[in-house]
Amino acid sequence: MRITFYAHACFRLEADGVAVITDPYTPCRSGFDPIDEPADLVIMSSATDPFHSDPSHVRGNPVVVNALGLPPAGTVACGVPIRSFPAYESKTFDYQAALGRDPDSNALYRFELGRMSLLHMGDVGNPIDPAQLDQLRGTVDILLALTGEHATIALGDLDRAIEAIGPKAIIPMHYYSPRGVLKIEPVERFLDRLDPARIIRVGGPTLELTPDMLQPGAPKIFVFEQSR
């Protein structure tokens, strides 16, 4: 599987002749450059968040899936099985004071591509439901993990989710970027708490991952550089 990090929570994943883009941001709202590349499938954690749900700058005519709108059993789109796990933005962050609205719902979503299972954490801002953790346990190869903390899951709660789910690899996302407009934590706040031997700095925005690179036990953390 070829994985490219665009920015924020947006990745491009290519395998099995299918290109998938996750949680595309709105360029004029986020500060990030347009994707301007084609895809077969776009998966969004909701349809209402401009930082996670704008496929307008994806080329081609991709199938667009709102994970929050999926039935409990999930669906298959472009040959990719997808299952969602409904969640909410932070219930402790004061959205009314900051943005004049209540917390929105969104979804974590698991999908399968290139003989691997990936879990995208969407925009969850609370501890993950224990029942969902039970369902996810041992079913995730690669975790696309929220690590910016502000208005998303606290790092202590993320630690407990990682331990419960047991992914074979972690890719941090949704952290501070000087290009972005959000005042969230830098990725180093997450990385500084970990064994440096587990951290692999990709040195660019793209990496080829194969199942044999993913070993059970303490997961490796692959840190990408954003491309947008």
Image (cartoon, helix red, strand yellow):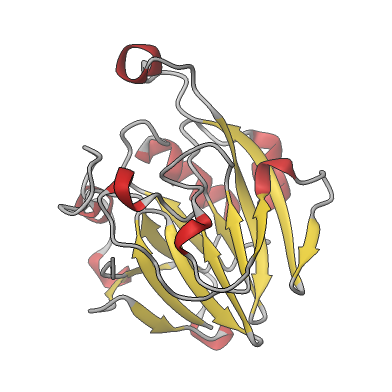
Residue 84 appears in the rendering: yes
Residue 124 appears left or right of 179: right
Q: Up-down: is 40 above or below 45?
A: below
Q: Up-down: is 208 above or below 3?
A: below
Residue 178: percent from left, percent from top: 15, 52
Residue drawn at the location 66% of the way across and 86% of the way down = 16
Residue 218 appears in the rendering: no
Pick the residue in front: 84 or 193.
84
Q: Which image quarter holds the C terminus? A: bottom left
Residue 87 appears left or right of 153: right
Q: Which image quarter holds the N terminus? A: bottom right
Residue 226: percent from left, percent from top: 28, 67
Q: Up-down: is 136 above or below 21?
A: above
Residue 156 appears left or right of 189: right
Tell me which corner region of the image, top left, top right, bottom left or bottom right, holds residue 227: bottom left
Tell me which corner region of the image, top left, top right, bottom left or bottom right, holds residue 200: bottom left
Pick the residue in front: 144 or 164.
144
Pick the residue in front: 129 or 178.
178
